[in-house]
Image (spheres, rainbow, N blue to C red):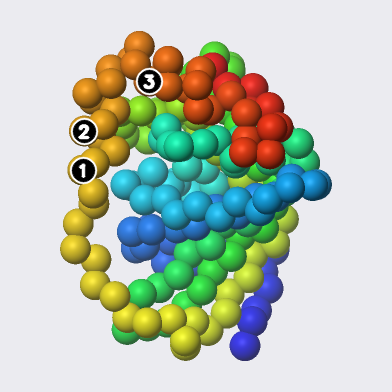
Amino acid sequence: MAKFYSDLNPSLQNFIQAQNIFFTATAPQHGRINLSPKGMDTFRCIDNKTVAYLDLTGSGNETAAHVLENGRMTLMFCSFSEKPLILRLYGQGQIIRPKNRDWETVYPLFTPLPGERQIVVLAIESVQTSCGYGVPIYEFKEERKTLREWADKKGEQGIYEYWQVKNLTSIDGLPTNGT
């Protein structure tokens, strides 16, 4: 059965730290819902009401566009091990880029990665757990090297140029306020 919490207790924070993948969901007022998988040790619990992840360059930047439009965001963690659990974090997102003053405070929490473009912070309004009994058991093999290799090959200038072409608006035409 689903349970709701007002914040992340230590047990739930430990659960998050044990996961190799998480999912982000956002939606504009009008347009497509975005659901994205994330990994690569980019997630941090800042405190019991605040979490953040280092967002890497991708084919689009829907999360930034949607968060800038309305702030709504859901993060989901799902156990693929023997002990089933689904954890959802609901709240208001914030986008922090290297040019923002908050970057200097939040960025040191992360290990630098090639292609990093922004930090997404979630102010938690509600936490929900559910059973996850229907989720299959999977074994984590390894992180993919493709994104790191792609970003290293592009270099800083190549990444910047990529952002100009692919990351300034959402697929629905909303601005991301990138770079």
Q: Kindly report the distance in space between the C-alpha atoms of the residues bearing marks 2 and 3.
A: 12 Å
Quick one: SS at disc 3?
Answer: helix
Please report the residue visible at 21 percent of the width from the left and 33 percent of the height from the top.
Answer: 149
Please give the residue where the numbered disc 3 appears in the rendered image: 159
Residue 103 appears anywhere in the view: no
Label placed on residue 130: none
Q: Kindly report the distance in space between the C-alpha atoms of the residues bearing marks 1 and 2.
A: 6 Å
Q: Quadrant of the N terminus?
A: bottom right
Please give the residue where the numbered disc 1 appears in the rendered image: 145
Residue 21 in the image, given as x and y percentages of width and height = 38, 58
Q: Quadrant of residue 48?
A: bottom right
Vertical arrangement, residue 107 with respect to residue 158, above or below:
below
Q: Quadrant of the C terminus?
A: top right
Vertical arrangement, residue 165 with respect to residue 171, above or below:
above
Which of the two residues, 96 or 123, is positioned nearer the viewer here? 96
Horizontal arrangement in the rendering, residue 131 relative to residue 80 (left or right):
right
Of the residues shown, which amino acid type is indicated by label 1?
A: Lys
Q: Residues within 10 Å of mark 2 (few under 14, many from 20)?
A: few
